[in-house]
Amino acid sequence: MGKSITRKIIEAHLISGSYNPGSEAGIKIDQTLTQDATGTMAYLQFESMNIPEVKTDLSVSYIDHNTVQIGFENADDHQYLRDIAGKYGIHLSRAGNGICHQVHLERFGMPGKTLLGSDSHTPTAGGIGMLAIGAGGLDVAIAMGGGAFYLTCPQVIKINLIGKLSPWVSAKDIILKVLEMFTTKGNVGCVFEYGGNGLSSLTVPERATIANMGAECGVTTSIFPSDEMTLSFLESQQRKNDWTELKADADAEYDRIIDIDLSKIVPLAATPHSPENIRTVKDINGIKVDQVCVGSCTNSSYKDLSTVAEILRGEIAHPDVSFVIAPGSKQVLENLSRDGYLGKLLSSGARIAESACGFCIGNSQSPPSGAVSLRTSNRNFSGRSGTADAGVYLVSPETAAAAVITGVITDPRDLGIEYPLIRVPERFIIDDRMIIFPEDIPDPSSITVRRGPNIGTPPSHVPMPDTISGEVTIKVEDRITTDHIMPAGFRMKYRSNIPKYAEFVFEGVDSTFHERALRIKSGGKHNIIVAGVSYGQGSSREHAAICPQYLGVKAVIARSFERIHAANLINFGIMPLTFKNDAAYAAIDQGDEIEIPDIRNTIESDKAIIVKNKTKGTEFEVLCDLSDRQRKILLAGGALAAEK
Ligand code: MIC
Ligand code: SF4
């Protein structure tokens, strides 16, 4: 039997284990990326490993998330990241150079290589044929130190894209279709591998849009072949030598194969408050729109923004619509400017935001109370925009542009104009001077790392106790995202200061959590979180594990977990336990006193884990499928402690 692309790359990078879906394998990581919001913690942990220089082929530190700089905190972080990069042989992409995933695609991504990034949308680089995986900062730090990245060897789902998209339908609509089919739950441990004749009309940035939002389905990653399209993208980036062909064998084996007929896809939208709430744009036609934001790592390419410019043709934004654009990179912005599109967008009243995450993570451009915001980004969880009661709809650039004109949700095919065909330049203006290369640093060892008052210390680790004994501090529903656990937006400036950031755990869900957790901890007891299906959806932020750990959380019992969050919990010594059935979840309440006896022994001997509910006088069994490596980490109280 032939091999999938996924299998070929994993096998070529195996350090431990074998290609055996469902079991743990360790792979070599060629490239890493971090961004500032997860990077400071990743580098604090990297520093504590005492390794003189990164051991990857390439590691890039991007400054793109927290660029608002209200107060000293973000600026302190940037300074710290700059010094760390210089000292340890890391490339630094300065604030203003663009969003990590867009810049990585343009300047560094290479087909066939592995990329590990401390951001859940790292799979964007799957658009160029990389095996690109999102992880917590500690896993990335370990990879920078030359350690393996451990993943559950995935099941590979082949998605054949057949035929051609109709005018006014674009890559965003394809991935919204995929989300409609797969939802945000139940895809942990899978990879989406794309193929089919429809690929011949999909450029690399379009493929990247699709790979980017595979993250919303919860898959390990998404990957495309490397073909002529990939070559011409790399040529446009003056990087043709980075190209290699990459394709699945004709008789490759897959766990599941599905076909999507591109010609049947219509403009779609993810409606509030989940990327899986898919409706056709026609179905929601006419809803009044207050804000339109075009940008984010999903849809901020040259083609995305020039298409919007051409649809608007200088028409001024509807008086009730605030229209914001955030080009994905300095390169995109410069080329839009050269080719006249920036001027067109300006004359349509676009508010030009920095080439950064900005509105997507809710640290700027929050919509008014109760507003409807149409965005080309990838997540519409409640509150993520910075406005608790705003409704965010995720749409294509075409659908976004239509609403800028009409002021209401509009199927762009109803605009009655011809679909603009954009000619993407064969050569972009390339200017890498906003990247500080390791070669630019004359004497790395002489660098003294500046640590402003916002830079804390790496998290400490407490070994697993003999018995977990405490209280259910909070019981939450299904699909709790890391945005619910650890809010970003204007709280994100505390990413490098754990005691401060921990004050905001579950802020939007139950603002008394922090206080109650501290009370339980100071009473010598453990905090236990009880949750529903798909706990920890969304981002890779390990703070959603570190801050609870700081508050004394020792176990999360959920109906199911998302991959990155479960790995982060283990990395910080928190047991991720799964209910065997829904009845057990239903029978437990917030405030119940819980005991998990003899837990060290149980972990070591792989025995069944029994949870005693002392309040209810009942007991039930939970599941925890651990590798030997994970057992060691949990016993030590965390991955760094286990390494020592
Ligand atoms: C996100 O889109 O939620 C983020 C902000 O990029 C996160 C990373 C973070 O929380 O810093 C992600 O996707 O991993
Ligand atoms: Fe940035 Fe948004 Fe992309 Fe996250 S999803 S990396 S916040 S643009």
Image: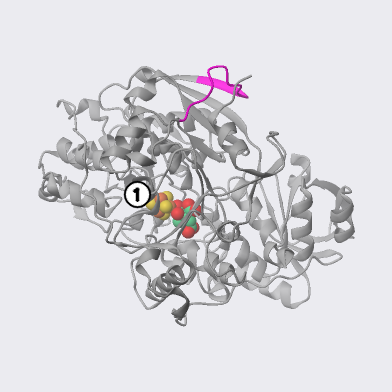
Q: Badge 1 local density, few (<14 within 10 Å), some, or many (20+)?
A: some
Q: Which residues are magenta?
A: 246-258
Q: Position of residue 508 (x, y in %)?
A: 52, 60
The quarter of the picture where the C terminus appears is bottom right
- The quadrant in which residue 479 appears is top right
**Residue 310: horizontal and vertical position, in percent?**
15, 37
In the picture, measured across the screen, residue 572 lies left or right of residue 136, that is right
Q: In the figure, is residue 3 to the left or right of 599?
A: left
Q: Is residue 285 placed above or below 137 in the rendered structure?
A: above
Residue 395 visible to the viewer: no
Q: Secondary structure at mark 1?
A: helix
Quadrant for the N terminus in the image: top right
x 34%, y 58%: residue: 358
Q: Amino acid at mark 1?
A: Arg
Please name whichever residue, 106 or 613, is drawn nearer the observer in this view of the structure: 106
Q: Nearer the viewer, residue 606 or 175?
A: 606
Q: Position of residue 458 (x, y in %)?
A: 59, 72
Name the dominant secondary structure of the magenta segment.
Answer: loop
Q: Which residue is mark 1?
A: 107
Q: Residue 11 lies in magenta, yes or no?
A: no
Q: Is mark 1 within 8 Å of ligand 2?
A: no
Return the residue nearer the eye: 437 or 35.
437
- In screen coordinates, is 309 left or right of 268? left
Q: Position of residue 516 (x, y in %)?
A: 66, 71
Q: Nearer the viewer, residue 130 or 322?
A: 130
Residue 628 can be seen in this image: yes
